[in-house]
């Protein structure tokens, strides 16, 4: 599973996976208040260009603060059996 944030680092990682013949499952976090709408739009564009499946998780920033966890920690809780996450 690749956390595709829409940033340069995760895009490079996605392109490198494709270059070696691996199509990773990609996940992005969409904050309910639209805080990161431009990042999500970029992640969607990258996934579409590379023909990758992208799962959008809608998350409340308030909930993350209440749980005192980062978006990355949330993904690790949702996908505990993954061997490795790539974060920027």
Image (cartoon, rainbow, N blue to C red):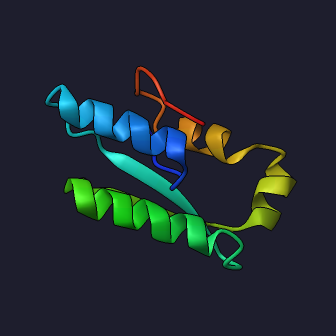
Q: Is residue 35 above or below residue 28?
A: below
**One can see residue 1 in this view:** no
- Closer to the camera, 30 or 74? 30
Q: Quadrant of residue 76?
A: top right
Give left or right: position of 81 versus 87.
left
Give left or right: position of 22 versus 38.
left
Residue 53, given in percent of the width and then of the height, sits at 26, 56
Q: Is residue 63 above or below residue 85?
A: below
Residue at 40 percent of width and 34 percent of height: 13
Residue 24, given in percent of the width and then of the height, sits at 28, 39
Task: Tell me the quadrant of the picture where the C terminus can be found.
Answer: top right
Q: Is residue 33 above or below residue 71?
A: below
Give left or right: position of 5 versus 17.
right
Residue at 80 percent of width and 49 percent of height: 67
**One can see residue 23 in this view:** yes
Q: Quadrant of residue 20?
A: top left
Residue 62, given in percent of the width and then of the height, sits at 82, 66
- Closer to the camera, 8 or 85? 8
- Closer to the camera, 46 or 24? 46
Residue at 19 percent of width and 56 percent of height: 51
Q: Is residue 15 above or below residue 85?
A: below
- Residue lying furthest left: 21
Residue 68, given in percent of the width and then of the height, sits at 84, 45
Residue at 48 percent of width and 31 percent of height: 80
- Residue lying furthest top: 83
Q: How many marks?
A: 0
Task: Tell me the quadrant of the picture where the N terminus can be found.
Answer: top left
């Amino acid at each position: 599973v690749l956390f595709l944030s829409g940033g340069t680092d995760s895009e490079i990682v996605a392109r490198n996976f494709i270059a070696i013949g691996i199509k990773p499952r990609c996940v992005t976090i969409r904050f309910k208040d639209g805080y990161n709408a431009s990042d999500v739009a970029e992640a969607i564009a990258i996934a579409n260009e590379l023909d990758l499946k992208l799962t959008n998780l809608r998350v409340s920033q308030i909930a993350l603060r209440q749980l005192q966890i980062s978006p990355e920690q949330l993904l690790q809780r949702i996908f505990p059996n993954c061997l490795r996450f790539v974060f920027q």
